Image: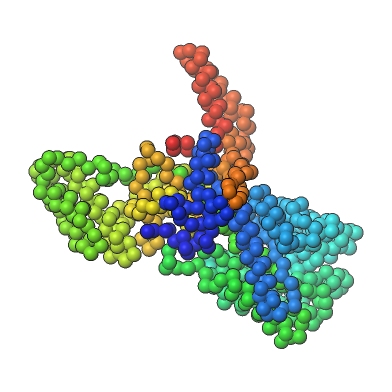
Amino acid sequence: MNNFGLDIWANKNFIIEDGEIKLNYKSMPSLFEIVNTIRTDDVKGPLILRFPHLIKRQIKTLYNYFEKAIEENAYKGNFHAVFPLKVNQFPAVVAAISAQGKKYNYGLEAGSKAELILAMSKTRNGANITVNGFKDEEMLTLSFMAAQSGQNITVTIEGLNELETIIAIASKSNLQIPNIGIRVRLHSTGSGIWAKSGGMDAKFGLTSTEIIEAIKLLKEANIIQQLTMIHFHIGSQMSDIAPLKKALREAGNIYAELKKMGAEALSSINIGGGLAVEYDQHEKSYARNYSIDEFSSSVVFLLGEIMDAKNVTHPDIFTESGRFIVASHAVLITPVLELFTQDYQEKLLDFKDINPPLIEELKELNRLLNNANCIEYLHDALDHMESLFTLFDLGYIDLQDRSNAEILVHNIIKKALYLKSANPTNELEQLQVKLQERYLINASIFQSLPDYWGLGQHFPVMPIHHLNTTPLRAASLWDITCDSDGEIGFNPDKPLYLHDVNLDEEDYFLAFFNVGAYQETLGMNHNLFTHPNEYTIQINDTDYNITNAIESKTILDILASIGYNKDEILNQLKSKLEKSSFITEKEKNDTLAQLERFLYQNGYLRTTN
Ligand SMILES: *Cc1c(COP(=O)(O)O)cnc(C)c1O
């Protein structure tokens, strides 16, 4: 049975049971059940489901593996982690991070003023705040205020000008000076599509010459005691561990050198983020070549080795992994609105009492097709179809015969494709691309899967029910934006098969997994589709609670968010209707009420049952 690569990407967070996908945790609710419960409340459109227990699992994994590596390597420094807010700043996520990370003193990382404000208000005293990215005097002053409020804050400088600004603020204010980190510009680069943060031409970090200059400035200003951290980040979703090892050697040696140059308070190395998540659904290409076990052991072992060789005390290790922590916690559920080419359904076959002999033969081929004979039978079927088309053109068979022939041949091709899906021939691959079914999903790829649109990043996708029947339709997914980029095409190398469902009789839901990192704030309002309705699902031993429901913006609010005046829009629409001639006053009032109801709904389609 097709399990949609669950064993590759799901990390045992989900299992398939009784034809449905279920949370593999405590009371193990099925996604279908959760979705139906939410939808009883007249909720339509796409949904984002958040599972805080999956955030907890990742935080625990990160800390446990580093602590294990520290013990195994008799490493002397401590492990600290912060969550980089840019990966997901939504309130329910930050709340889950705080609640689940409390035990570990898990902190937050900020890369902009707004994120810094969020970090300052949400970080428990004692936990760390790190600040990266480009900063002006105001942003640096905010970090002084955080230090003044007793927070454990480290500002990583990206250039000498930032250090000069820090020195200037220190000399003109009495605020506490934050800890200072230096982002080093590595000559080694990362790997994968997001690896742009290292190398000679990198956007961030100080060169060796600049680092030496920074030490001089810090000493002159008498604040060298504030320099506590060396930082690097070689890019997100590292596919290969080798570049990280190179970066560690480079940064480790810089650290040891700086200690020798008199940076006595220097006490930690921050290795940034980059820990990868498995997004692949097909066995062929795994997204990364290392495990969290190898990752943590390598970091701890290498840093210990470098420091021992240079006779320097082991530094504390900081990580800023974001994707790894939150990617798995969110699932995007999209109802399927329509199957575009459902015209070849078997139930539409309408045989006569006496059918042309070639149709009878097609019926037999369809009935008897199996793994061993399928290529031969497929060729017979295609051949018969050609002959039947000729017979039709010459007037020997009628439209009903032709329709039956087309449905039968399509069915035979579909079955052959499925039977040979593990090992398709060239011919089959070409047929597959021609025969794909287009599933229209009630969602916007621009809003909910922007990395698919922008970078071709694949997200695992599967139906949440029907999983005890074999899906036969080669599927491409179309979203409801009016943009031809809003499509996830069928890829013969990484095929997606979905079920033939009759949407007049039942709903069909697809789920996209691992969408918890980056997608939500990167998502854009193309065609004015906004962030979907979201729900936080707390699973307990016997049941589950749906909490923290946040509805998608209403149509009027979407318009207001780009600068329109809601009342004006509403009044303009109303006055037009009021002026038009209705037969009865009641009809007019009903129409106005209906209009108003529409404007206070979200902009997604409401056509599913
Ligand atoms: C984006 C970013 C991270 C997070 O990277 P992930 O790949 O999501 O773990 C960490 N540190 C810095 C400086 C970043 O810019």
Is residue 513 shown above or below 198?
above
Image coordinates for residue 195, horizontal then vertical, percent: 57, 68
Comparing 162 with 354, the one in front is 354
Residue drawn 85% across the image and 72% down it: 225
Q: Nearer the viewer, residue 212 or 60?
A: 60
Q: Is residue 344 at least partly visible in the picture?
A: yes
With 581 as the anchor, is 72 left or right in this view?
right
**Near-viewer residue (581 or 395):** 395
Q: For the point 36% across and 45% down, which residue is it?
A: 501
Q: How far across and how far down the image is residue 46, in percent?
A: 51, 44
Q: Which of the 4 image quarters holds residue 573?
A: top right
192 or 375, nearer to the observer: 375
Q: How many marks?
A: 0
Above or below, comparing residue 274 to residue 392 in the picture:
below
Can I make out residue 205 in this image?
no
* Left or right placement of residue 91 versus residue 216 in this view: left
What's the residue at 56%, 51% (across, down)?
27
- Left/right of residue 14 with respect to residue 261 in the rendered view: left
Q: Where residue 159 sits: x, y (%)?
A: 73, 67
Q: Residue furthest right?
A: 174
